[in-house]
Amino acid sequence: MDLYNEISFKTSKLITHKYSTSFSTAVSFLPAEMRRAVYSIYGFVRIADEIVDTFNTINQELVLKNFERDYNEALANRISVNPVLNSFALTVKKYNIPPHLVESFFKSMKADLCKNSYSDSKELDEYIYGSANVVGLMCLKVFVNGNDQLYHELEKSAMKLGSAFQKVNFLRDLKADIKQLDRSYFPDFDQDTFNESIKYKLIENIEKDFEESKEGIRRLPGKSKLAVLIAFIYYRHLLGKLSKTPSKVIMNKRMRVTDAFKIFLLFKALLKYRINKI
């Protein structure tokens, strides 16, 4: 079992490395046990996300349903022949991740298969809670490592940061979401009406989420503060880049940060962490 569990966590680590070099870099600064746990969380949510976003030649609804069933069985049986689910179930057990977080995540993933647009901020907030906020809360459970009081104190900040990250992703991926997946997450506009005024209104909203997450980052224990700070600085820079990019370009091109500049942002985060300035 020990060997299989090790292989399971390494599988989730491989998925993280292949899908997100930026996230992998941030996670690499965590202590070994936390690192394994966060890899398992990312591996789990990434596979579910791929099912609803890219596995479009199969019965996505059935595959997602089976994935959820297999997760519940892994939790009940304390073992799964799916290495990703095995490692995630072990993490859920070890860090007492509440069932409602995983349930909310699956609810949002199912929405991606049947819902194409969101009519108001309440609907969008509910989707973001399940698709992003709960992932931040799962990681927070790992970071506080059993300190329930600290978890509840930082819960709101973690949710604000998750919202900011998700909304940046939405803004960056407008082209793919609208033109390829036929999804419109932000209410009140489509590919023909998206303009500079709407863009700046969205950015203002995201900036507010970032600002409200700062206090929580400051209070994170140990190296978890550094790992989250790296992600914070990367996404904040990406938002700045989107702010400077014309709305028409955003609708037709996916913005990215070059690998060379990611290295600069990493050193910036290390410096801020060292002088304790966020």
Image (cartoon, rainbow, N blue to C red):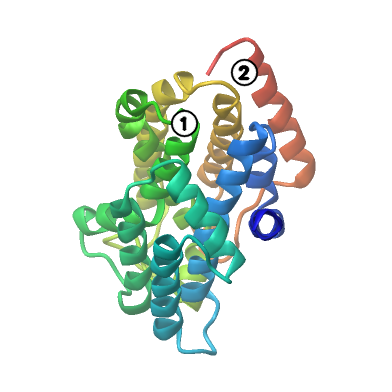
Up-down relation of residue 31 to residue 55 (above or below): above
Query: Outermost residue toward the right?
Result: 260
Residue visible at 56% across and 66% down in the picture: 252
The first of marks 1 and 2 along the sequence is 1
Left or right relative to 26: residue 157:
left
Residue visible at 76% across and 35% down in the picture: 263
Mark seen at residue 122 = none
The amino acid sitting under disc 1 is Asn
Residue visible at 34% across and 72% down in the picture: 110
Point out residue 54 in the picture as x, y percentages from the top left corner.
55, 76
Circle 1: element type:
loop
Residue closer to the observer: 134 or 79: 79
Q: Please identify the quarter of the rendering in which residue 154 is found.
A: top left
Q: Is residue 110 visible?
A: yes
Quadrant in which the N terminus appears: bottom right
Query: Outermost residue toward the front?
Result: 1
Residue that badge 2 annotates: 273
Q: How many marks?
A: 2
- Dot in front, 1 or 2: 1
Circle 2: element type:
helix
Up-down relation of residue 17 to residue 136 (above or below): below
Q: Is residue 203 visible?
A: no
Residue that badge 1 annotates: 145
